[in-house]
Image (tube, coloured by chain):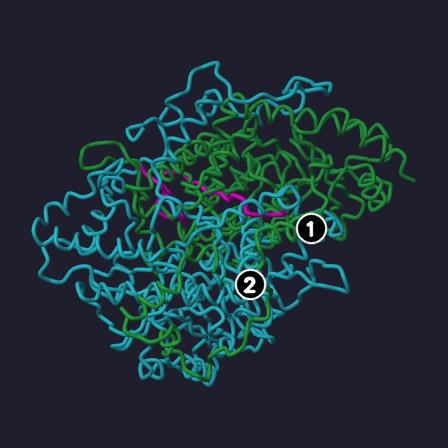
Chain colours: A green, B cyan
Amino acid sequence: MNRYIPLTQEDQKYMLEKIGVKSIDDLFSDIPENIRFNRKLDINQSYSEMEVRKIMKKLSDRNDNLDDYASFLGAGSYDHYIPSVVRHIASRSEFYTSYTPYQPEVSQGTLQYIFEFQSMMGELTGMDVINASMYDGATATAEAAIMAIRVNNRSKVAVSSTIHPETLKVLETYCHFREIELIRIPETDGKTDLEGLKLIDSDTSAVIIQNPNFYGIVENVAQIEKATHDNKSLLIMSVDPISLGIIKSPGEYGADIVVGEGQSLGIPQNFGGPYLGFIGATEKLMRKMPGRICGLTNDVDGKQGFVLTLQAREQHIRREKATSNICSNQSLCALMAVVYLSVMGREGITDVAKQCISKANYAMEKLLETQKFKRIYSGPIFKEFVLETTLDADKIEKALFDEKIIGPLDLSRFNKNKKNQLLFTVTEKRTKEEIDKMIDIIKGVQ
Amino acid sequence: MKNYDKLIIDLSKKGRKAYALPDNDVDSKPLDDYLPKELQRVTEPYLPEVYEVDVIRHYTNLSNKNYGVDTGFYPLGSCTMKYNPKINEDMASLDGFTKLHPYQNENTVQGSLALLYDLGQKLSEITGMDGFSLQPAAGAQGELTGLMIIKKYHEDRNDTKRRKIIVPDSSHGTNPATVTAVGYDIIEIKSDKNGGVDMEALKAVLNDETAGLMLTNPSTLGLFERNIAEISRLVHEAGGLVYYDGANLNAIMGIARPGDMGFDIVHLNLHKTFTTPHGGGGPGAGPVGVRADLVDYLPYPTVEKKEDSYYLDHNRPKSIGRIMGFYGQFGVLVRAYTYILTMGAEGLKRVSEAAVLNANYLQSQLKEHFKLPIDSICKHEFVLSGTDGLSQYRTLDMAKRMLDYGIHPPTIYFPLIIDEAMMIEPTETETLETLDRFIEIMIKIKKEGEENPELLHNAPITTVVRRLDEVKAARKPVVKWSR
């Protein structure tokens, strides 16, 4: 007897009789003999809850978790503070055990928080419409490229080399199979090469940039926007929503499509997922968007309510003509983001962003003072920055780890030419004490 | 609190706060010193200013407007809305799993890598495949990954003439949408009168342009495809690959395996079969398994084992590439792994037996009262027509009336090949008493419809909102709050 399966021997006998068969095996008589699986699965025995807990605890204890370390590692996954409220709301099983809100009368909870998510993200990004969310920031970027092609029927997409290298990889995969040509705009001085924008032409559907970019630098978006729109291409901006507390929003820059990774907004780092991709656009492009969108309406009595809308774009209606094959959203992660943004509010999101920018700048200045680092890219930074070091990167990592600090990202992980270049991340969670300690330890590295 | 109708922004009052940050303890300069004015935002975002109790009450009230598996019976066909065990949630929220950066040194995440490796092994055994990628974020992305593998396989053999994917007309909408996403063309073939693949129709479309075939088995009609081995043989003979949409694995665990049916690629939906919650629409997970000679095509990085330690292999020259920013929906994978530990080999087989018994029991009792277009043993689900041509109400009306009885209705109007379809999947986690109650309500609603169709047209009447105006929502979409 299994605790999730209530079927008793008596039930089984009664049900088989009602069905008119003799045994459970008879219910599988439609499976041809030659493809039956006639042995026991070689996986594991069934474990009691106590045993499961032990096995899982032992596995999780083999990981060094960030509760015990101060982390200066970011690059797309960030250690921001998550208020207790977030987990409590996201743990309500009325939310997490529900399905996609296709029966709106009994899904108003889900639909309303999606509407609020769309609203808050619309406010932050300055866009008219944000959808109910995508798998992650990287896939949202790829979907944006495909969306742009659908909008203007051009054949190529240009992408700045300063976007996250793994987002670029995902974009390459999606574009290769979709048969979209991808043009790489080179980088110079850690920023999108403005001269390189000459690569875009009348076949270029869109230009994709990230701001702040992968190296933490705030890009010269105004000039990129002008070059893009002069060419009648669409501007796709990937942004970190936390930065929008202080940094000029895609809407203010005149971006056509906005995408990004929303993990910063109250979602645990989770070894890389589940995270929260988002995509938004101007009103003009709304009907070309992928994924779910929630809209406001009223019921037959005139009472306000929410439904999934513009579904004629989606796979369950349009099949091969759908704007995307996506059939889900990261709903529960969107709930975490919406609760996070409710807690932080207008002021909190600015306060967090201000602490990030000031602590990151403090750390950068102090590191430069050690004389063991130099800045190789110029320009204003937000919460991340790259420094080149004369020290051995592995030694830095090890020395820090021994003192309970997760060090910066070694950029040679992605680019062999970027040896000894380290990407530091400093969020509002890092204290002066932790930053100073990190620097002291690095000073001692030979 | 059924009538609670506020947006969080409606609660906003200038000066309220729900957060507290420590003071900034570094020497801080004015913002302009860090960021030139022209790079700063000008418009303030219109976000709520509320205190913590507002947040908690607001979202608690919203949760009360939702129906979940924890609320009651959810026989939503093709979605496998089974119980989501609580231990899964607890294990997925262990600090040792949640507080990990994906780029931490591999030596510091051996527990996670071991879990991923072992989960891949277990799923391979359950499906009879030779290797798995756990990265795909959802079933639809699993399909995308699978078709990318098919395309890359043909590309590597310079067989670029193959650009057509065959899909039965009973297929889920993601199948054809995914075909488009990889730049292929779709050929839809009709089902035969028993709901299976029409073998003659299949033979007629197979040729040297066939890239592959996508098949859901058991089908969306809840039927096991009896000719399945022959289907995969024919497609292979024509030079194509066969893709198994494993959305309905809940019917056959420990009883039959896609690998043994000759399939090359399979995806699973961990949020269906392996009890990870649907989360109001996601996150799910759609791992993809392949036969031995396609393992090199899987997305990178893969998790590999060397002696007693585990590592991520990024060096995979034949791989289709990277499909997610990091390694997929790790937290979801932890839940599925926990479930497999709980169930074990025998437990998983019992799941499928009980799921199929429950579905057949419902079918046998309901077919006395409703039209059952295909009358045979079903697997985990079955499809009936809610109404016939003479009824004064439609299947939609039945579904809405069911809400008044506190039950989530079945999937309706899918698959498209059945008129007024009602697709019913009870799952294994429901009692005989719940099933009997459902039968009773179905019959009662039918009777209500015959005697007083208006009652059904007006349903639901007990829910927090009644039928919503979808036309209005789409005509002039309001998709965010106004200032």
- The spot of residue B43 in percent (x, y) is 47, 23
Q: Amino acid at mark 2?
A: Gly
Given residues A199 and B187, the one toward you in this image is B187
Residue A375 location, quadrant: top right
Q: Where is B245 relative to A30, above or below?
A: above
* Residue A433 at x, y percent in the picture: 77, 25
- Residue denoted by label 1: A58
Does residue A88 sit above or below A193 in this rendering?
A: above
Looking at the rendered structure, the secondary structure element under dot 2 is helix
Quarter of the rendering containing residue B68:
top left
The image quarter in which residue A219 lies: top right
Task: Name the residue: 28% across, 28% down.
Answer: B3
**Residue B463 as seen in the image, left or right of residue B216:** left
Q: Nearer the viewer, residue B120 or B104?
A: B120
Q: How many marks?
A: 2
Classify mark 1: helix, strand or loop: helix
Quadrant location of the C terminus of chain B in the rendered image: top left
Q: Amino acid at mark 1?
A: Lys
- Nearer to us in this view, B451 or B147: B451
Q: Chain of mark 2?
A: B
Q: Nearer the viewer, residue A348 or A38?
A: A38
Q: How packed is label 2: few (under 14 Cα within 10 Å), some, or many (20 or more)?
A: some
Disc 2: which residue: B344
Residue B190 visible in image: no
Real-space Cα distance between discs 1 and 2? 19 Å
Q: Which mark is residue B410?
A: none
- In the image, residue A1 sits, relative to residue A198, either above or below, namely below
Highlighted magenta segment, given as a residue range: A271-295
For the residues labelled 1 and 2, say whether their Cβ atoms are less than 8 Å apart. no
**Name of the residue lying farthest toward the top:** B15
